[in-house]
Amino acid sequence: MKIRMLAVALLAAPALALAQAEPKDGAKPAAKPAAKPAAKAEAVATVNGVAVPRARMDLMMQQQAARGAPDNDQTRAMVRDELVNREIVAQEAQRAGMAKTPEVLTQLDLARQEILVSAYIRDWVRKHPITDDDVQKEYDRAKAQSGDKEYKARHILLETEDQAKGMIAELKKGGKFDELATKNSKDNGTKDRGGDLDWNLPSVFDPQFADVMVKLEKGKYTETPVRTRFGFHVIQLDDVRQVKFPALTEVRPRIQQQLVQHKVEGLVRELRAKAKIE
């Protein structure tokens, strides 16, 4: 089960400003209290008396930075304008009663849940980091599994063993492999290419297929059908070449991402096992 890391949503927390009472009977209005520096620092704008918290600006700037945007005056001005526009439209939505509609309430509930899930997963991953040793072990495992050769093969996929034996008989009579594949193969992805599977590592294929393929001589085909979960195959090996496995530095980020994903999937499976689901 894949768990997608959820995007962090902006939390709206407008603070209503208190209005000053009008003085009566010509009385001298009370002096306005000086604004607290901390309060000013917490807002980047006010819209109809409602403060736009700096926390929203900070979070949105983090999101922009993650997309590669620079932290400069231009980006901050753009983000501030966007936050002001959102506040204006949000206030109109409130006045229109949108916040009380069943659909919006459900969406808000889902957004809250996504934020909680994302926050928990990020915190859990931070407390259970992927180590250099983890990355090295996965790299070594993948390298050993892939081997140092890749193979260019083609195949004819049939539904029954007898059909596969019939194809082998046709080949022995001088039939051309690509023509027989185009006419008879059940693999719609390769039949129009004469059964060509292109260059691949053995690990790409089902073990039964790969085990037979790597033992073939170039230009030879299997003389007995090869059974996999897809059906019965006749395989021909066209060529073999050495392949250079990428250096660890090239694939480290991808390995780390995959290992984090596997850890999160394991976490969810563990939590599901403990949960009472009816």
Image (cartoon, grey):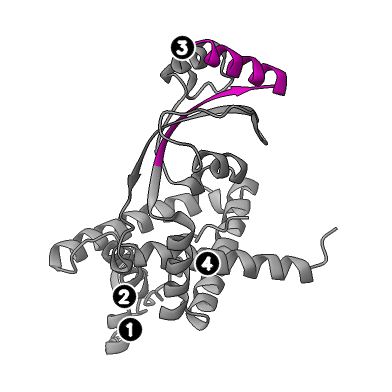
Name the mark on residue 212.
Answer: none
Q: CA distance from mark 1 to mark 4?
A: 30 Å
The answer to the question of whether label 1 and label 2 lie on touching residues, with beta carbons closer than 8 A, is: yes
- Choose the circle earlier in sequence order: 1 or 4: 1
- Choose the circle earlier in sequence order: 1 or 3: 1
Discs 1/4, front: 4
Discs 1/3, front: 3
Callout 1: SS: helix
- Choose the circle earlier in sequence order: 4 or 2: 2
Discs 4/2, front: 4
Whether residue 37 is in magenta: the answer is: no
The answer to the question of whether label 1 and label 3 lie on touching residues, with beta carbons closer than 8 A, is: no
Range covered by the magenta-colored residues: 151-175
Task: Write down the residue under mark 3.
Answer: 179
Whether residue 173 is in magenta: the answer is: yes
The amino acid type found where label 4 is placed reads Ser
Residue 87 visible here: yes
The amino acid type found where label 2 is placed reads Ala
Q: CA distance from mark 1 to mark 2?
A: 7 Å
The quarter of the image holding the N terminus is bottom right
Locate residue 112: give its quadrant: bottom right
Name the mark on residue 118.
Answer: 4
Task: Write down the residue under mark 2.
Answer: 43
- Please rate how many residues cluster around mark 4, counting C-alpha atoms within 10 Å: few if below 14, some from 14 to 19, many from 20: some
Callout 2: SS: strand
Discs 3/2, front: 3
